[in-house]
Amino acid sequence: MRKYIITFSVILFAIVVPFLDINNTHVFNLDWTPHARIHEVWQLITNSSIGIFCLWLVWFKKELKTSLILSLFVTGGFLLAFCLKDLYGGSMKYLDGSEKTILGLNIGVLGFGIAFALLVFSLLIERIKPTHNNVKK
């Protein structure tokens, strides 16, 4: 189950976000400074690269814990940036005032919130599940 939770999280930050951001609302937004756009592209490339590495760790190296922690950093980083948005003037609204929502919740906060919660749950389950070495016979 943990493999699928990690994979779900990676799909969100490594595929869905670039799909949503490589357009005129983000990467090609002429109202953004060129400096802000380079940071956006850098973030997309970095997160997608981390995602590819996480999938390799999970599906080929069977190293779930490192992949899980990296996925927590990416999803949690977004959630922290969202929580701190008032400190730096950030917003999830577009310049026209619109916002992508589902049931009144921002899709980024909803998606990454679910992913982060599942990842934390997976990490906690890993810590409390008995391993082969510490089970008494």
Image: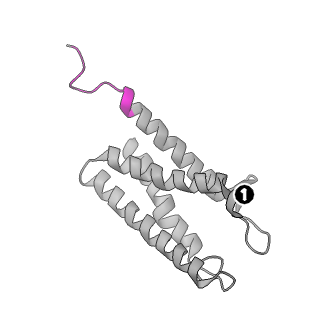
52 to the left or right of 44:
left
Q: Amino acid at mark 1?
A: Asp
> Circle 1 is placed at which residue position?
86
Here the colouring is: one colour
Residue at the top extreme of this rendering: 137
Q: Which residues are magenta?
A: 126-136
Residue at the right extreme of this rendering: 97
Residue at the front extreme of this rendering: 87
Q: Quadrant of residue 49?
A: bottom left
> Dot 1 lies on which element?
helix
Secondary structure mostly taken by the magenta-highlighted segment of the chain = loop
Vertical relation: 16 (above or below) 131: below
Q: Position of residue 10 (x, y in %)?
A: 44, 57
132 inside magenta stretch = yes
* Circle 1 Cα neighbour tier, 10 Å, few/some/many (<14 / 14–19 / ≥20): few
Vertical relation: 81 (above or below) 125: below
47 inside magenta stretch = no
Q: Position of residue 105 (x, y in %)?
A: 71, 53
Q: What residue is drawn where x is 49% and y is 70%? A: 44
